[in-house]
Every structure is written in C-alpha cells, then in structure tokens.
Amino acid sequence: MTTRNSSLRPLTFAIPKGRILDEALPLMAHAGVVPEAEFYDKKSRALSFAVEGSDMRLIRVRAFDVATFVAHGAAQVGIVGSDVVEEFAYADLYAPVDLDIGHCRLSVAVPVNSGDTASESHLRVASKYPNLTRKHFERQGIQAEVVKLNGAMELAPMLGLSGRIVDLVSTGRTLKENGLVETDVIMQISARLIVNRAALKTDPRVGELVEAFRAMMAEKVAA
Amino acid sequence: MTTRNSSLRPLTFAIPKGRILDEALPLMAHAGVVPEAEFYDKKSRALSFAVEGSDMRLIRVRAFDVATFVAHGAAQVGIVGSDVVEEFAYADLYAPVDLDIGHCRLSVAVPVNSGDTASESHLRVASKYPNLTRKHFERQGIQAEVVKLNGAMELAPMLGLSGRIVDLVSTGRTLKENGLVETDVIMQISARLIVNRAALKTDPRVGELVEAFRAMMAEKVAA
C-alpha cells in the first residue's frame, strides 16, 4: 500500500464492533492497515481513526452499518460477516475475499421437546435476519412471519413470542443454556472483505487493497 | 403488588439496556418491582430474572425489542422511551404513565456551515428512526430517503452518506464534537410505562402495576 493519490478523498475502511474485530486486526496489519494508537483506547469518543503511514481512515460501526456504509459508497472498503452480506444483498456491494475468520453458522432452533415438526404452512420466527429467514422458509414452501429482534433471540420461544428462532450459532452453548436445539443450518458464515463496486472501478487504491488482502490470504493457505 | 394468581403465567416485565435503566430501577423499586441479586451481576448470562416477593420476571433487552415483546404480548409490561413508542406506533401497545426520566429529544442535525437550507423537495437522512424521520419531513412537504443506521449517526454527514441526520440529543455534546448543529426538534422524549392492551384487559396484575406506577408518580409530583 505505497501508492498515494492526494487528489482523492481519504479512503474509508469500515470494520465491525465485536466478535470479528479481534480476528480481523492481525489480517489487516498483514495487508498494511494498522490503526493509530487511539483506536485501542476504549475511552476514546472518536468515530474515525487514522491509519499509520496512509491517508486511509478507519470507522468502527455495527456490522449491519458496515454493509450500509460500503453499499452507499460512504466507505469504500469494509470487513463484515457473510451473514450481513447475504441479508442485505446490496447490488453495489462486492465481497471478493473470504477472510477465513469469524466462523459461525445461521441456524433455525426450536425448544427441546417442542414436538414441532415444521409441517405448518405458516409459522412465526424471531430473528435479526428477516430476509434470510423468509427466504429459507420459502424454499420449503412455508410462509414465515418474522418478528425482528435485535438481540436475545432465545427469549422469544421462552415467552411465547415465536415457536422458532433464526440466529447465529457458534459453539451452541447459548442455545443449550436456553433449552433450544438446532434443527437446520441455513448457511455457514465467515468474514469477508467487501468493497463498493463503483469505488473499485474508479479508485485504484480499492483494487490495491483487494490485492493486498488476496495475497495475504494466499500466503496463509500456502503456509 | 400483593395479589397473586397462580393460575396465570408469570408476568413478564421488559426493561431496556443502557441509558434509561439506571433511572428506572429506583422507580420500579418504589412500585414494588425489585430484581433478584443476579440481575446486577454483569457476568451473568441469564436472560430472565426473578423479582423479589413476586412471580414476575424481568427481561433486559434492547429498547426497540422492549416495544416488540410488549406489543406482541410476550411481555405484558415494559419501560421504554417515547421515541420507541412513537417510532413503532403498535396498535396493541399502550403507554399509560410518563415516568419523567430518560429525558432527551429527537432532532434533525446538519454539518455546521453546511449552507443547507432544507429547501430541497427530496433529501437523504441517516437515522435509527425511519418512520419518525419520514413523517417529520412529510409534514414539511419533503420526501426524505432514510438510510437506516444502528449507531454512530454522526459519521453519515462526515462521509457523505447523507446531508442530515435524525438522532437522539441529550446535552448536544456529541453533535458539537462532530461538527454538527441541531436545526429542528422533532419531539421531546421521556421514558414511559408501557403495557400490552389485551393483557391490561384480561390480567388484573397488569392494571395493578399501572396503578402502582401512577400512584408513585403522583407522590413524586406532590413531594
């Protein structure tokens, strides 16, 4: 990442808070993207951070917002789970590199011993992923009413909000603790490098970043 | 809250994480709703908590989800900001008591010196509140395209995602730090006791809770 083009606006790289971030930072460093020290200061109120030796800036936002910023071209590059890429299915968002981190799956879960045989033609599901949930049940000829929740999905069956949930599953511990059992895996998830399609065509720095991440992943596979 | 009706399911009381919670707990205690000790254990993975001397249970979820659980009758009672009540406008959700806590406002903000005169017939706004945002601009004869963000709204004008944001404002410090200035107040906000309408009609415990909160607020005003 040595090329500079001072006539362009600084490139914005959007990364998600939480789960993926710790695994993403070493990969970013290998690809030449190292945040300034303030990035690690938990008391900082800054929303945007410089990148060492580059005019790039980093923004750290919620995973769904990473996709929104990149799809609209307000950030040109980002890292986000394939769950978010698929949920939004933005035409202007391209996910060229699988980063092989943030592995988990999107699954359907029901209460243990619910006796629920998924044979209904209509059912209610709580999920943070209304689009992926609807599509999954449509493929089975089932019309699902999705109740959108932003967290604590496991409460929905417990309180009678819905018979099923569609949620991210990693170890399965949370499901087990809440008396739920996985019945279907909708998709396997990993984090992706994402770029805005228009920016990739018009700004050579975006293509260079994609190549840096590709090369780094190829090295990892070869090692 | 001495009446028991063991033939009914436990009553579920939904409270929001974050901002409102610290102010809400003393009011809840005055109305007889005191969470078990585990509620205060930050390491607890529990999603639902007992209430001392009652068969009620507490759930602590995100503010938007408080409204969703209560509107669907999965929780019968809750506390949430009037911003959330108005954003969803659920027919089955009734907000009988203003708790006079969690005060802030929902405002439009633009970059300082943006020269933006709000005279356009179409504009783009970033907000967590798409419905309230659209309605606000409709009242002015303006068709607003809302980009839904889940946080860090202030980044949107900075990165060219939108010319305006609609966000919660308390002291105004965050806006100022990010070079933004408030141009319109859409609504003044405070936290409300909310109940599910059907539960209020059929479960006497819900009406009793409403009366306990009403009496407590009347005492506060008289004091």
Image: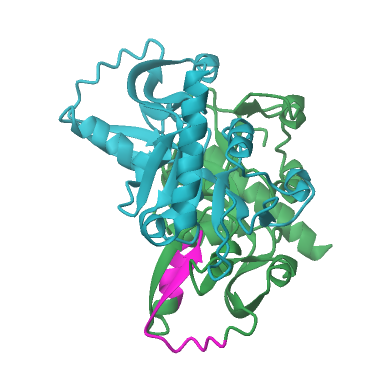
Chain colours: A green, B cyan
Q: Residue at horizontal 64%, vertical 27%?
A: A49
Relative height, residue B125 to residue B183 (above, below): below
Relative height, residue B206 to residue B123 (above, below): below
Residue situated furthest right in the rendering: A223
Name the side, left or right, on which B54 lies relative to B96: right
Which region shows up in magenta? A115-136
Q: Is residue A208 magenta?
A: no
Residue situated furthest front in the rendering: B2
Q: Residue at horizontal 72%, vertical 39%?
A: A32
Task: Say which quarter of the image contains residue B40.
Answer: top right
Q: Nearer the viewer, residue A101 or B146?
A: B146
Q: Is residue A128 magenta?
A: yes
Can residue B76 be seen in the rendering of this structure?
Answer: no
In x, y percent, where is residue B179? 48, 15
In x, y percent, where is residue B110? 38, 20
Name the side, left or right, on which B172 lies relative to B44: left
Q: Nearer the viewer, residue B24 or B212?
A: B212
Q: Nearer the viewer, residue A28 or B92?
A: B92
Task: Say which quarter of the image contains residue B4.
Answer: bottom right
Q: Residue at horizontal 57%, vertical 54%?
A: A151
In x, y percent, where is residue A193? 60, 52
Can residue A41 be seen in the rendering of this structure?
Answer: yes
In x, y percent, where is residue A25? 74, 44
Residue situated furthest left in the rendering: B141
